[in-house]
Each structure stands twice: as C-alpha cells, then as structure tokens.
Amino acid sequence: MHSERGNENRRRNNVREEDECSQQSGEESRQSETQSHCTSNDNNITESCSERELSRFGGEEDSRHEISRTILQEGEEASSGLGDNESSEDRPIQNGRDREMEGFKENRATSCHSLQISQLQEEVIVLRAENAALQEQLGRQENELNRTRAAFSSCREERDRFSRRIREMQSKLASLQSQSSQGSQTGSSPTRSKSPHINPTTGERTPTSREDVPIAKMAERVRLKKVESGDRHILGSEISSLGLSTTKMAEHLAQNVHEESHAQEIFQTLFSTGSPVPENKIREFEVEMERLNSRIEHLKSQNDLLSLTLEESKGQCDRLSVLIGKYESNNTALQLALSYSDQAIETFEVLLALLESEQDQIRANCRAVGLVKSDDENQEKIMEMLKDSQENRKSAESMARHFLQKLDRSYGISCRMGGCHISPWEDLSSHSHTTSTSSSVSSSCDGEFSKADERRLRDYITQLKNDRSAVRTTVVELESVYVDPTSKDPPPIIDAQKLDLENAVLMQELMAIKEEKAEFKAQVYLLEKEKTSLELQLSSREAQEQAYLVQIEHFKSELQEQAELINKLKSSNSNQKALNIDESEATEKVSKLKARIQELVQTIEKVTKNSEMSAQQSVEFVNDLKRTNSALVIAFEKAKKKQQTKVKKLELQMSSLTERHNAQVRMLKQRIAMLEGETGHRLLQTSSSSDLPI
C-alpha cells in the first residue's frame, strides 16, 4: 500500500512539474509574442493583446481542467482498488486543486503585468513622437527667434542712427537759438549793419551789401543731408544769390555717391548673411541699377527743364495779361477822349453856325440899311436875304438850345429862372453824371439866344478840352508784345535766370547721356552673355566635328581594307580554303567596325545631348537671374520708400520743432519789447518827477 501511494505521489509531482514548465514556456512565448505584436502594430495593440491573452487564458484553463480530470480519474481508480483508505486519499487531491488555483491566479497576475508593460511601451513610443515634434517646433522657434533678433538688431541700429541724427539736429537747433539770441542782442546795438544776416528758419548765412571782407575760419565738419526724390536740383539763381556758403551744392554733388553706397551696403549685407550670390548676378544687378538710376536722373532733369519752361511761360502769360489790361485801359481812355472830342466838335459846329448866322444877319442888315452899295440888286432880293438870315438864325439858335439842353442833361448844369444865370461848375474833374431838371431851365423862356448861352457853349468847350486832356494823361506808352520789357531788376538776377535755364538744359543733356551710357552698358552685358552662349555652342560643335572626322577616317580605313580584301580574293581564286578563312576574318572585322561605328554614333548623340542640356541650363540660369534681379529691384524700391517715409516723418517733426521754437522766440521778443517799453515809461516818469520844483 505504501509503495503504491509513493508512486502516485511521484506521478502527481511529475505532472505538476511538467505543468509548471509548460506554463512558464507558454508565458515566455506569450510575452515575446505580445511584445513583437505591440511593436509591429501600434494602432491595434490593446485589442489584439487582450484577445490573445483571453484565448491563452482559455487554453490554460482547458489544460488545467484536463489535468484535474486525469488526476480525478487516477484517484477514482485508486479509490476503487483501495476502498478502505478513501479519507486519506481525498486530502492530497484537494491540496492539488488548491495549488492549481493558486497557479492560475499567479498566471493571471503575470498576464496583467505583461499587458501593463505593453501599454507602457505604447506610451513611451507616443511620448517619443511628441518629443520629436516638440524638438522640431523648438528648432523652428529658435530660427524665428534668431530672425527676430537680427531684425531687432537692425531696428536698434536704425534707432541709434536716428537718435544720432536727432541729436545733431538738436545741436543745430541749439546753435540756431544761440545765434538768434546773439542777433537779438546785437540788433539793439548801433553797429547793426555790420552783423551778417542769418535766416532763423534754415540757419544759413546770406550775404548782405554792407558785409565786411570775410575772415578766414577753421574748417568744420558738416553732415550732408540726403537729397530726396521730390527735392529739386540746385539752380543758378540760388548759386548767385546764396553763393557757396550753404551745403546744398555739396548735397547735390554727393547724391550719386550716396546711392551707390546704398547699393554697396545691400551687397555687403548679402555677403555677411552668407546667401550664395554669384558674381554675374551682382554685375547684372549693378548694371540694371545704374540704368534705372540714369533713367531716373534723366527724367528728373527733364522735369526740372519743363518746370523752368513752365515758370517762364507762366511769367510770360502774367506779363501778357498785365499788358492786355494796360491796353484795355488805354483803349477806354482813348474812347473817352474821342467822345469828348466829338462833343467838342459838335459844340464848335453849333457855335460856328451861330456865328455864321449872326454874320449873315449883320450883312443883310447892312445891305438893307445901305451901308453896302449894291447897284444891281433889287429891294426884293434884300428882303429875301433878311428873311433867310433870320430863318438861319432861328434854326441855329434852336439847334444851339437843343444842344445846350443835351449838354445840361449830360453834365447837370442848371440856370436860374429869373435871369438865366449860369451856376458855377461843381467839379470839372469828377465827371459827375447826375440828372438835373434842365427841361425847366432852358433858354426857351427868352425869345432870343443870348450871349450867356453862347458863353455857356464856350464853357462847355473848355470843359470838354479839360476832360480830354485829363483822360489823355492816363494813357501810358506800352512796350511791344513780342519784345521783352526793359526790366527794372538789377542785371545779376537776369543773369541768374539765364543761368537757371542753361543749367537745366545742360543737366537734361547730361542725364540723357548718362541714360544712354547705362543702356549701352546693359547692351554690352547682354552681348557678352550671348557671346559666352555662342562660345559654348561653338565648343560643342567643334567636339561634334572632331567626332565626325574620326568617323570619316574610320570609314576610309574600312574602305581601304575592303579594297585590299577584294584584291586578295581576286589574286587567290585557286585557294578556296584561304578565301573562306579571309571571308570569316573580313566578316569579323566588319562586325567589329559596325560595333565601333555604333559606339561612335552613341558618343556623338551623348555629346549633342550634353550640349543641348548645357544650353538649356544656361537659358534657365539667365531666366533665374532675371527673376532674382526683378525681386531685388522690388525689395530695394520698398526699402527706399520706407527710408524716405521715415526721413520725411523726421523732417516733419523737425519742422514742427523749428516752428514751435520760432513761435517761442517771437513771444520772447514781444515780451522783451513790452518790458523795455515799460522800463522806458518808468524812466520818463521818474525823470519828469525829478525835474519838478520842490
């Protein structure tokens, strides 16, 4: 019995050891499989692992149930053979079951641990990817930070440059303030005419006629301003009026150098940043820049010339308009004088008619009385003459009365009803055309035309003569329309205007020559590029020519060999075997030569393809150069516009500061004048009080 129990226990122990070994090997294989599956397929890790683990757990449970069944069967067999000791045999079976349950729990814990490890591995992979993305983002941010630092450094340099310029302008403003204060102090002194005139707005020294001989002075450094695109060039009138004491001439002469320095600064920044810029590209950019600058200068000179011609034509139009006004005034004056002359002639005619009628009447009366001897004439004729003279007298008097009424209406002279006396002239020069009641005041009240009326006619004649002479005095002798007037300006201003026009014409011609020069340079550069491309094509053609020559020589040698073979064949007709051998050798040579020809053709094709590729690359390179040139020109223009806007803003600020300073200076001068007036008034009061007797 004891031996049988020992055997059963051994069997159970062996089965358990085998189960544990199989379980360990299965767990190791499962762990390796789960790890490989997790690394190969990251997206479906959790699902596949969970499914495989559950299937494996199910397999383990099945194997364990089978083991437990075998154990139970063995126990039953043992219990059937050993029915007496059932109680002693049930205990180890129960212990085995408990151990199996503990092993199952341990296996389940290890599977959960493997799942956790796989999940951790997945998290590690995700974190590594996130770390790589963050590192890339950090690199981009570092690049952006470097760019912003470079931009910030450039802005800082620009700020420092502007601050230096502002300090210089402030120092200049302070010097202007000191000069203005010195000028105000010296203005009250008696030696005022000897001080030079200083413009308070620009701070420039303008020469005066009373200025003494200039004294030699130490040279000082003057910072030249940048000539803006809107600023006009220096003209001859400014040179003659201002002289060379200002910096405008130097600024105008230094403009081209300043622009070239800007271009050199751009190239220097490109080289400093390390951007690969080829030399021919830089040369093309310089040629294009020079051409554009010359074009701009030519257009500026043309604009200056047109502005000068416009100013000249404007002055000519103003002069002609003034001259037309003078002609119109002379025309109106002459028309008035002509009207006065016509009225005077009419009065003379009326007066002449009166005198002639009076003379005829006197002659007729004399004949009637017999003072004039007339033997042939009859009495009837004398009576007719008397009647005619009286009628003529009446008609002349009526015409004179109507004319006097007309003159009275136009000139407003009235006579009194009682004695028909003439009122004195109110104002001969005022020409007051006021209406009067001349209808009630006329000579028709009397029967005859009196001497007073005749005197009135004579007075009207004198008045019309005076009016005509007064109007004639307003007529001015005018110059011709086509001849320039003799100007009253001093001759230096005329010379300066001529110098302006000549300078503008010369500048326009100079800019045209510069533009042509720049265009010629651009054409030369393009011709050089074409020359290089043609040289490349020529070199490729020379290579092709060499290859063709080699092929021709090869063909010639082949023909010679074939001719030699034919001669050999003709000479050796008797020997057929030798011919067969020679034919085989000839066919071999022909095949070799054909292969060589094919190789040469292939090399020629390769050379042609390479030449075509090089030509295409050169064309593409030229197009790239043109595109980059246009991009650089656009960038340069943008930078120039930004710089100009900044400079204009600074100039506006400086102009506002100068205006404020000038306003303050004016207020201070007014206050000083008020204080001086108050002190003078007080001194007068004190002196008057001291002069009074005690």
Image (tube, rainbow, N blue to C red):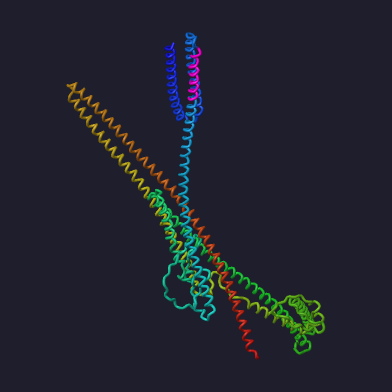
Residue 95: image location, x then y, percent: 49, 19
Tell me the quadrant of the picture where the N terminus can be found: top left
| Range of residues picked out in magenta | 86-106
Give the farthest residue toward the bottom: 693
* Closer-to-camera residue (461/557): 557
On screen, 327 above or below 636? below
Q: Residue at x 51, y 27 (%)?
A: 47
Q: Main secondary structure of the magenta part?
A: helix
Residue 329: image location, x then y, percent: 63, 72
Q: Residue at x 47, y 46 (%)?
A: 141
| 266 on left or right of 672 | left
* Closer-to-camera residue (215/475): 215
* Closer-to-camera residue (355/566): 566
On screen, 304 above or below 354? above
On screen, 192 above or below 55? below
Residue 629: image location, x then y, percent: 43, 50
**Picture quarter containing residue 608?**
top left
Give the farthest residue toward the top: 81
- Check residue 500 for magenta coloring: no
* Closer-to-camera residue (228/219): 219
- Check residue 98 for magenta coloring: yes
Residue 495: image location, x then y, percent: 48, 71
Tell me the quadrant of the picture where the C terminus can be found: bottom right
> Is residue 466 something that shows in the picture?
yes
